[in-house]
Amino acid sequence: MAKIEGETVIRRPPEVVFDFVADETNEPKYNPHMVGSRVLSSGPIGRGTKFLASFRSGGHMGPALIEYVDYRKPERIVSVTRMRWADVRGELGFSPSASGTRLQWSWDLHPVGLVRLLTPALTLVGRRQEKATWSNLKRLLEAGEC
């Protein structure tokens, strides 16, 4: 298992950051590895909502099924993501800060099969990619482009 954690502060209210992030169809706007995402569930986004996303990695495309297993607006989203090469349990926390929203992320990456041998490298790459992804979100939201 690999643990990937981090945080950033975004100069927007927690409700704005939460709502934008909770809608996984927005993620391709700030995550260059996600090329598409669509909602599979009906009704409002919440616990049990499922998304089907497409990721690009190393020139390959792959699907990911994302399900929200805990959803407490505007404080916390816990998800389980299933991909061919790994399962990921993720938690996003949104809390007020003096200048906006403190966004924290924590991912437990569980590679499967021979990919487990690459866990140390996946951890390093994952930390770098997550930092870049959330930095992109920060720039996007602070620029008011959404």
Image: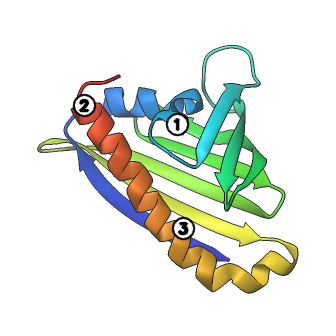
Question: Looking at the picture, does residue 119 appear above or below residue 110?
Answer: below
Q: Are marks 1 and 3 in contact (CB under 8 Å)?
A: no
Q: For numbered disc 1, what is the local secondary structure?
A: helix
The residue that disc 3 covers is: 126
- Where does residue 11 sit, x and y in percent of width and height? 19, 38
User: What amino acid type should be assigned to the residue bearing mark 3?
Assistant: Gly
- Where does residue 22 sit, x and y in percent of width and height? 51, 32
The residues tagged by marks 1 and 2 sit, at their Cα atoms, a distance apart of: 18 Å
Residue plotted at (47% across, 69% down): 127
Task: Work out which quarter of the rendered image holds the C terminus and state it.
Answer: top left
Labels 1, 2: front one: 1
Q: Residue furthest front?
A: 59
Classify 10 Å Cα crowding around label 1: few (below 14), some (14-19), many (20 and above): many
- How many numbered markers are drawn? 3
Sequence-wise first label, 3 or 2: 2
User: What amino acid type should be assigned to the residue bearing mark 2?
Assistant: Pro
Residue 21 seen by the camera? yes
Q: Residue furthest left?
A: 98
Nearest the viewer among 101 and 30 is 30
Residue plotted at (71% across, 33% down): 51
Nearest the viewer among 99 and 132 is 132
Question: Looking at the picture, does residue 74 appear above or below residue 7?
Answer: above
Sequence-wise first label, 1 or 3: 1
The residue that disc 1 covers is: 27
Q: Is residue 33 left or right of residue 30?
A: right
Classify 10 Å Cα crowding around label 3: few (below 14), some (14-19), many (20 and above): some
Q: Is residue 112 left or right of residue 126?
A: right
The residue that disc 2 covers is: 13
